[in-house]
């Protein structure tokens, strides 16, 4: 929900859940109630995403196990994509798999070259229940796939194998120990 024209301007920054938190591993529930609570969650998610300098954020990253994500993400042509999707489903992916740098607000400071499809389409609804269809290419397609993965209980490290996966998980474990 936009207040004053700027998403998140009336929201409160929430604590980010870090890798290892069980809420990041459970598939999120469908949203069934639309209203002030959902709009408030979306505002808080925008505020949190901007405070963390992210380009996307899933609800479970702030501890809410509902199928909602927000984004403010450029594509490869530097066109800005801004919005949110409630109950998103990845309905279409491209044919070309592209390996590119990917990070996550729940694994801060850790990045890895991760395979993602070059095109993605997500369908769902907005905060009022109005159907939305969001299509992206390049970096924005990566964002759509990344956030949808979160809502299915996955993190980008699950898309890695071998030494890349081990490196990311070791770095995440070190960061967790440093915070404890």
Image: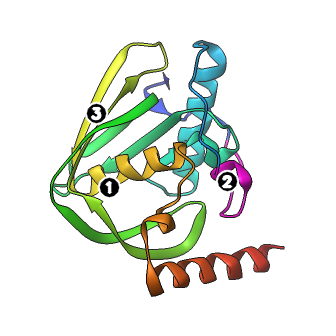
Residue at the outermost right position: 180
| Neighbours of disc 2 within 10 Å: few (<14), some (14-19), many (20+) | some
Q: Is residue 61 above or below residue 156?
A: above
Is residue 61 shown left or right of residue 156? right
Is residue 38 shown left or right of residue 111? right
Which is more foreground, mark 3 or mark 2? 3
SS at circle 3: strand
Badge number at residue 142: 1
| Neighbours of disc 1 within 10 Å: few (<14), some (14-19), many (20+) | many
N-term mark: 1 or 2:
2
Give how far across and how far down residue 156 sits, in percent: 47, 63
Badge number at residue 134: 3
- The chief SS type of the magenta part is loop
Is residue 177 shown left or right of residue 106? right
Which is more foreground, mark 1 or mark 2? 1
Q: Quadrant of residue 63?
A: top right
Magenta region, residue range = 13-25
Give how far across and how far down residue 70 sits, in percent: 47, 39
Measured in 3D between alpha carbons, the distance from the residue under mark 3 to the one under mark 2, in whole angstroms, is 25 Å
Q: Quadrant of the C terminus?
A: bottom right
């Amino acid at each position: 929900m936009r207040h004053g024209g700027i998403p998140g301007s009336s929201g409160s920054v929430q604590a980010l859940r870090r890798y290892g938190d069980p809420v990041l591993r459970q598939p999120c529930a469908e949203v069934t109630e639309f209203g002030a609570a959902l709009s408030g969650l979306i505002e808080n998610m925008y505020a949190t995403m901007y405070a963390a300098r992210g380009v996307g954020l899933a609800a479970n990253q702030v501890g809410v196990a509902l199928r909602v994500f927000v984004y403010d993400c450029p594509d490869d042509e530097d066109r800005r994509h801004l919005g949110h999707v409630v109950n998103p489903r990845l309905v279409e992916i491209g044919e070309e798999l592209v390996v590119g740098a990917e990070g996550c607000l729940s694994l801060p400071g850790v990045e890895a070259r991760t395979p993602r499809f070059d095109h993605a389409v997500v369908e769902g609804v907005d905060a009022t229940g109005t159907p939305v269809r969001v299509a992206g290419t390049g970096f924005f397609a990566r964002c759509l796939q990344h956030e949808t993965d979160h809502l299915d209980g996955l993190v980008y490290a699950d898309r890695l194998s071998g030494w890349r996966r081990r490196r990311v998980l070791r770095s995440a474990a070190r960061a967790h120990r440093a915070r404890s």
